Image: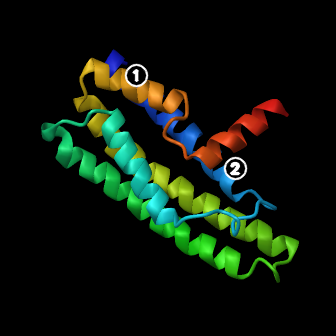
Amino acid sequence: MNQSGSQSNHLGVRLLAAFVLIFTLAFAPGVSLAAEKGDHKDRTELRIQDMHAKLNITAAQEEQWSKVAQTMRDDASAIDVLVQARMAHSKDMTALDDLKSYGEIADAHAEGIKKLTPVFAVLYDSMSDPQKLAADNLFRRGEHMSARHKQGRKASAKN
């Protein structure tokens, strides 16, 4: 396999691992979603803007970036519907209902990652070496995650 293809595959694996960790921490059974402030869509928009800036997206890359951003928005919308349903029924859910709800969210997130990975790979392939390094570091250090997810990640690392 060539080095470019290998880098794309490694990035895809890192993206998948990072996003699975984010949503595992965010939607694990027993985690209070109601306590979270702000709208999921607003947080997604802030992450999109932050990533755009940190990745130094060029004018030539805007078309590819818009596809990445739209895929992130679509994923956030799909998950938001499931989270809202979970929150609406949180007081009357049985343990089995809770697990099913969590599974639906995890499945929706996995589908979102499957859609995001090839779209992001096209953008990543168009990036300069400094942009790729910024992307690698952004995902490696978890800077693409919200502060709440970083706190959960640090707490998990301590245990």
Q: Residues within 10 Å of mark 2 (few under 14, many from 20)?
A: some
Q: Which residue is mark 2?
A: 25
Q: Amino acid at mark 2?
A: Leu
Q: At which x and y percent is residue 75?
A: 46, 61
- Please identify the quarter of the rendering in which residue 35 is found: bottom right
Q: At which x and y percent is residue 59?
A: 14, 40
Say if 122 sits above or below 148 in the image.
above
> Along the polypeptide, which appears first: circle 2 or circle 1?
1
Q: Amino acid at mark 1?
A: Ser
Please state which of residues 72 and 34 is positioned toward the viewer in this rendering.
34
Q: Report whether 44 appears left or right of 70.
A: right
Secondary element type, mark 2: helix
Q: At which x and y percent is residue 145?
A: 54, 43
Q: Which residue is mark 1?
A: 6
Give the alpha-carbon distance from disc 2 to disc 1, as whole Å.
29 Å
Residue at image location 69% in from the left, 63% down from the top: 103
Please state which of residues 35 and 127 is positioned toward the viewer in this rendering.
35
- The label nearer to you, 2 versus 1, is 2
Q: Is residue 105 visible?
A: yes
Residue at image location 48% in from the left, 50% down from the top: 113
Position of the C terminus by quadrant: top right
Q: Report whether 62 appears left or right of 18.
A: left
Outermost residue on the left side: it is 60
Residue at image location 52% in from the left, 63% down from the top: 40
Q: Is residue 118 visible?
A: no
Q: At which x and y percent is residue 142?
A: 55, 34
Position of the N terminus by quadrant: top left
Say if 44 sits above or below 50 in the image.
below
Q: Residues within 10 Å of mark 1 (few under 14, many from 20)?
A: few
Say if 61 sits above or below 42 in the image.
above
Secondary element type, mark 1: helix
